[in-house]
Image (cartoon, rainbow, N blue to C red):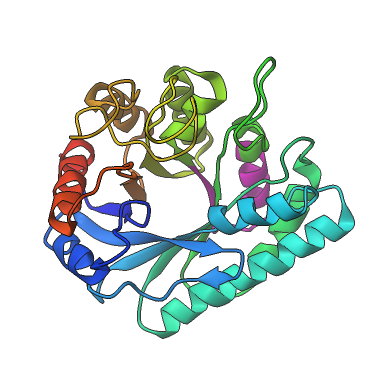
Amino acid sequence: MSLIVGAYPAQPVELQEQFYRGLAAISPIRGLELPYGPHGGTGWPAGAPEAWSAVVTAIPGTMQRLAANAAFGLASADTAGRREALDFAAGVREYARGLQDAGHEVEAVELHSAPTGGPSARWFEESLKEVLEWDWGSARVLIEHCDAPRPGASPEKGFLSFAEEVDIAVSLRNQGLERVGVTVNWARSVIESGSPETAVEHLSLGREAGVLEGLVFSGCSPEETGFGYAWIDAHLPAVEIQGAPPSSMLNRHEIDRCLAAAGPLPILGFKVGLGPDQLSPEERVERLRHMSVLVGE
C-alpha cells in the first residue's frame, strides 16, 4: 500500500528540511496531507520529494474561522456565514491550483460540514454544488467527516452526521457531479461515540453507498494525556508507537479491522502528532516509519 501522511503535526519547529528528507526514505509514502489555515496554505515543504502528491485539508482554517464566527460554514443556514465559507473554499481551490501549477499532483481537497451545532444538510449540499462547478484540476472534492453531536456530551466539532454526508455525496453524484466522495478520520469517528465500532460502521456505510474515497488513521484517548484533555482531536499515535499514551485507542487490531471494512481506497494514510517529547528529526521519522508499517503492511 502507498500512503498519504499528514506529517505537519509531527514536524519539528526547526530542522524541518532534515525531517522531510528522512520521510522521503520511507518507501510506502507517496504524498503529504497539507493544511490550509485561515490565511492560506503553506508552500511545498523543503526536503519533501517533488514527485510526491498532496491532499489538502481545510480543517485548520475551518476551525480557526469558526472560533471567530460561530455561523461560519459550508453547511451554515446563515447567509453571511455560508458566503464566508464559500469564499474560504475558493481560497482552498486557489492554493490547490497553485500546487498543481508548481508541478505537484493534488489528489483531493477535504472540506467540512461546519458550523458546530445546527449544520444544515440542505445548505451543505447547495454549497458543494457551487464548489464542484469550479475548476479543481485533477483533484477530487472530499467531505472529511468530523464528529457529529451526541446526547450528553460536548462535541469536538459537532458537524453533520456521517449518514447525512454520505447521502449528500450520493445525491451529488446522481446529479452528475462525480468528483465528490467522503473520507473517514479514525479518531473523529471514535470521538463521536466513544467506541471504535463507529469507525467500522462509518467505513462500511460509505463503502456500501459507493462514495468512500479515503481513510486516515489518527488516534484518541478517553483519558487526559500529554496531548490534552480526554477525547481531544490531537492526532494521537497508535499505542504501539514509542511515546504514545497507553490509553490511545488506536492499535494494530483496530487498523486491520478498518482496512478490511474499507476495502481498497484511492487515499489511505495516517496523521499523528508526537506529543510534548523533545525529539530529533531522526526520532520523529522513526516513529512515523513505525506508523507506516502498522498501516501499510
Q: Which residues are magenta?
A: 166-183
Q: Quadrant of residue 237?
A: top left
Residue 108 versus residue 42: which sits nearer the camera? 42
Query: Which residue appears at 28% of the width and 75% of the height?
Result: 46
Q: The C terminus lies in which quarter of the figure?
A: top left
238 vs 111: above or below: above
Please state if 239 lies on the left or on the right of 219 as rendered: left
90 vs 216: above or below: below
Look at the image and say whether residue 35 sits in the magenta stretch. no
Please state if 18 lies on the left or on the right of 105 as rendered: left
- In this view of the protein, can residue 136 be seen by the observer? no
Query: Which residue appears at 35% of the width and 23% of the height?
Result: 249
243 vs 124: above or below: above
- In this view of the protein, can residue 287 be seen by the observer? yes
* x then y, percent, for residue 193: 54, 20
Query: Which residue appears at 42% of the width and 33% of the height?
Result: 186
Q: Quadrant of residue 272?
A: top left
Residue 13 versus residue 41: which sits nearer the camera? 13
Name the residue at the top extreme.
Answer: 152
Name the residue at the right extreme.
Answer: 79
* x then y, percent, for residue 86: 73, 64
Please state if 144 lies on the left or on the right of 70 as rendered: left
Query: Which residue appears at 23% of the width and 68% of the height?
Result: 15
Residue 101 versus residue 168: which sits nearer the camera? 101
289 vs 65: above or below: above
Please state if 230 lies on the left or on the right of 235 as rendered: right
* x then y, percent, for residue 122: 80, 44
